[in-house]
Image (cartoon, rainbow, N blue to C red):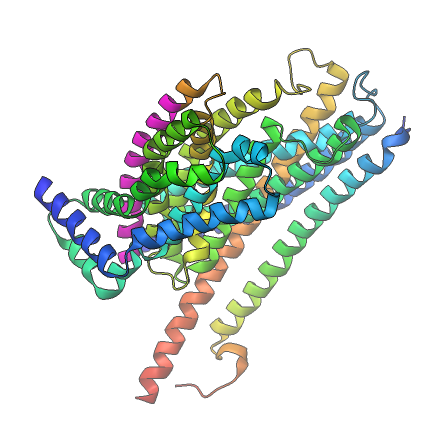
Amino acid sequence: MLTRLANPGFFMRVSGLALAPLAAAAALLFALGLYLAFFASPADYQQGETVRIMYIHVPAAWLALFFYSIMAVSALGTLVWRHPLADVSQRAAAPIGAAFTLVCLVTGSLWGKPMWGTYWVWDARLTSVLVLFLMYCGVLALWRAVDDPGRAARAVAVLTLVGAVNIPIVKYSVEWWSTLHQGPSVFRMGGPTIDPSMLRPLLVMALAFTLFGTALHLAGMRTEILRRRVRSLTLLQAERLERAAA
Amino acid sequence: MMRVFAALVRRDLAIAVRVGGAGGLGLVFFLMVVTLIPFALGPDLNLLSRIGPAVLWIAGVLATLIGLDRLFQADEEDGSLDLMRLSPAPLELVVLAKCVAHWLATGLPLALASPLFGLLVALEPAALGRTALSLLIGTPALAFTGAVGAALAASIRRGGLLIAILVVPLMVPVLIFGVAAADPANAGRDQALTILLALTLASGAVAAIGAAAALRGGGQ
Amino acid sequence: MMETGRHAVFIWSAYGLTCLVAFGLVLRAVLDHRAQTRALARLEAGSGPAGSGPRG
């Protein structure tokens, strides 16, 4: 019991120290990335100025997957090692991942309007991200539906892992489906021929997004640990009151 | 082991039949969805026959969803799930047996009746056969996938909508390959049928492990 | 330089929305943390939830 409690305590101390530098680094990188994205990079010969949307769209897509992976790894931690920090990490990652998936979807469709002439195309990539977003919604809904945090964590862990098995299948099947219906995607981003002047802002922004996401995740975990402490203390107090009343 | 499995399947089927025929009700629901589509789209037979397999598949997905919320919840409420947890038979086997019973009660009647309903949406004979075949192969995958959601929501009141939200994204691949396999004009139909079969088998394994883990987690 | 051209609306709304979501995430994190810290402080000080009710 003591070791179980000691770990979150250690985590609280370390994460408290790491949070401020992480946030500061993310802010600096954002400033640099925005400068590169708007002032120091040319317009694409094919996409024109709209290529600048890619500097947030691609990192958001990366974070959408990154946070799902965090959830999947934490889910293993919950089910296999029954580590309380894993529960907390799962819980904190879900809303952040969902938010970035939404950003990816909306920026993608804002890019699509000038490029494709319509806000939404059932393109393989967009469609897979939409399914990923639906899966995030399911995870969030399940968190809400179960009251007890331990049971909720185990239930969500199962769902996350089943979803993780499903994601590559969805990706493959959607690609199969889209070549069936409309031929290959109109445009490939991130191909090997990308110009370094565009790669630089993309990488800086991706790093900035990652640090920002990590800081948010750590902060969320800290809050979650506090929430659990509040919950157990409240329960303890209710018990004491009940005993006093009896 | 096989006797436990058979006994569970028989029990669940008996319950399904006695509670007002889950299969019968599912069929009526299936018919209703198929009936609704022409009202929404207009009675254009060419259009209907083109989207017919898709209509039948969507109806199949919806019909699978409606019975799911009681799949484990009823047993959770009356305590028989606790008995199953304690029994020497592995929980994975219990889950598989319940899935099979659920499929026999809802999915199989759908697949068998689909040629009949296909006539309503003006399917050609070839398309009728392929749709029935793809439903026969694909609906177990829907039942298996649905079982994971049902197990997760077993202890949640009014879990029906939640189950749909959890499970529908997982059913996307089955739907894609199912409809593709049902369309006789599709060049990749045989490949789709093979992949559909693979999906059914894989989802059986995933459902057994996943739903059993969910039920164990919910019991503690 | 900053000539975002005729697609300016799309570019700015994409960046604007991303900012909004990022700001929302930060706000949520800060407010939630503050609320939990307060609740914990109250509980550890020994008074009941919302600071009312008799104590045993």
- Give the image quarter of residue A32: top right
What residue sits 83% from the left and 21% below the top?
Answer: A43
Is residue B100 at least partly visible in the picture? yes
Is residue B220 at least partly visible in the picture? no
Quadrant location of the N terminus of chain A?
A: bottom left
State which region is magenta.
B193-220
Q: Identify whether A52 is placed above or below B216.
A: above
Given residues A24 and A163, the one toward you in this image is A163
| Left or right of residue B122, residue A123 in this image | right
- Give the image quarter of residue B129: top left
Q: Identify whether A69 is placed above or below C27.
A: above
In the rendered image, residue B208 lying in the magenta stretch gets the answer: yes
What residue sits 34% from the left and 41% below the top?
Answer: B113
Task: Where is residue A229? Give x, y as percent.
Answer: 44, 63
Task: Where is residue A196? Give x, y as percent.
Answer: 73, 15
Task: Where is residue B62? Give x, y as percent.
Answer: 44, 47
Task: Where is residue B211? Give x, y as percent.
Answer: 30, 45
